[in-house]
Image: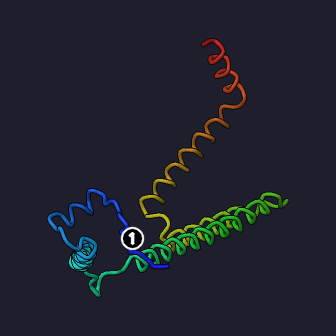
Amino acid sequence: MTQTPQEIRILLGPVARGLIEGVDRNRPSALDVAITTLKNQVRDLSEQASPVAPDQPTSDERILSVLKTQSRAIREMSELAVAEMKMTRLLISALLKDSDNDDPRLRELSETVIDQIYENSSILSADDRDGLLQKEEAFLTATRLELERGPDACKTNEGREIER
């Protein structure tokens, strides 16, 4: 059995044909050289385009920084929620008590504790806290006025709504 050399023909696409355009002899090696040249050019351009300076954080460092910031905010929020729950339980227990002696002091204590926690945390800015206090005051005022009017005011409003 003698082996005869077989010529294998490979059809090249338009990009590969463009790389070896004008080469008549030894087209496979010309294609190999062209591909190697292109790889080297891409590597050189990528090194020139994005040199990493030592003072610039990498993407991993930026992600780590964001994660640390987010975890600190979550920790502060959970501490705030726990403190608010404790103060709410304290106020509820004071309301369930028979005597009314400690109510103002407990309310002031709970508000002071919550305010200190908000001030120490970076969750809300001072402007945000002021806005929340204004909304709370508006809600309390509206509720107080509605309670002063009594149940007849609600019936009057219902009557007006039905007429519409």
Quarter in which the C terminus is drawn: top right
User: Where is residue 134 shown, x and y percent of the image?
Assistant: 49, 51
Q: Is residue 66 visible?
A: yes
Residue 105 occupies which quadrant of the picture?
bottom right
Tell me the residue at 50%/66% (across/down).
123
Q: Nearer the viewer, residue 50 or 63?
A: 50
161 versus 109 height, above or below: above
Q: Residue furthest bottom?
A: 54
Q: Label 1: few (<14), some or many (≥20) within 10 Å?
A: few
Q: Nearer the viewer, residue 146 or 70?
A: 70
Tell me the residue at 55%/50% (across/down).
136
Q: Residue furthest top?
A: 163
Tell me the residue at 24%/61% (across/down).
17
Q: Residue furthest right?
A: 98
User: Where is residue 92 shown, x and y percent of the image?
Assistant: 77, 59
Q: Is residue 50 visible?
A: no
User: Where is residue 117 shown, x and y percent of the image?
Assistant: 56, 72
Q: Which residue is mark 1?
A: 6
Q: How is the image coloured?
A: rainbow
From the viewer's perspective, tell me whether residue 63 is left or right of residue 84. left
Q: Amino acid at mark 1?
A: Gln
Q: Nearer the viewer, residue 76 or 115?
A: 76
